[in-house]
Image (cartoon, rainbow, N blue to C red):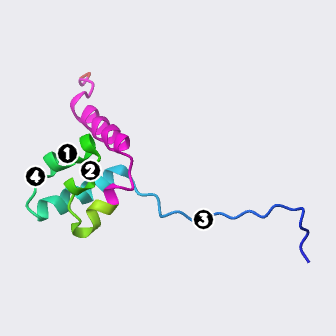
Amino acid sequence: MKKLENTQYFKIQSDQEIKVGDVLQLVYQAMTEKGYDPVNQIVGYIMSGDPTYITSHKGARSLIMKVERDELVEELLRVYMEQTMKAPDKT
């Protein structure tokens, strides 16, 4: 018989951690396949929080809702800065 004074721990396994960049890539592809302008639609979602800016095609809408909007902005800005603000070559 178990002792009742001991605390039992229960841990729920969360969905496999998905990277924000992967979410953006999958959403971008789904939006393109459906004929939408993915940049405009993703901006609309980020600015408003309204998930109907994102198609449900290939689960894109539910996928993007798993990521906080500020994380989307952070990833977009990080990638932009890495690609455009590279230090000049010292050769």
At horizontal 65% and vertical 63% (from top left) the residue drawn is 11
Label located before the other in sequence (3 or 4): 3
Label located before the other in sequence (2 or 1): 1
Mark 4 is surrounded, within 10 Å at the Cα level, by few (under 14), some (14 to 19) or many (20 or more) other residues, namely few
For the C terminus, which image quadrant?
top left
Label located before the other in sequence (4 or 2): 4
SS class, disc 4: loop
Q: What residue sits right under mark 1 in the picture?
A: 44
Label located before the other in sequence (3 or 1): 3
The x and y percentages for residue 70 are 36, 40
Residue 71 sits in quarter: top left
Q: Give the residue type at disc 3.
A: Ile
Proximity of marks 2 and 1: CB atoms separated by less than 8 Å = yes
Proximity of marks 2 and 3: CB atoms separated by less than 8 Å = no
SS class, disc 3: loop
At horizontal 25% and vertical 43% (from top left) the residue drawn is 48
Q: Which residues are magenta?
A: 63-89
Mark 2 is surrounded, within 10 Å at the Cα level, by few (under 14), some (14 to 19) or many (20 or more) other residues, namely few
Q: Give the residue type at disc 2.
A: Asp
Q: What residue sits right under mark 4 in the picture?
A: 37
* Residue 64 shown in magenta: yes
Q: What residue sits right under mark 3 in the picture?
A: 12
For the N terminus, which image quadrant?
bottom right
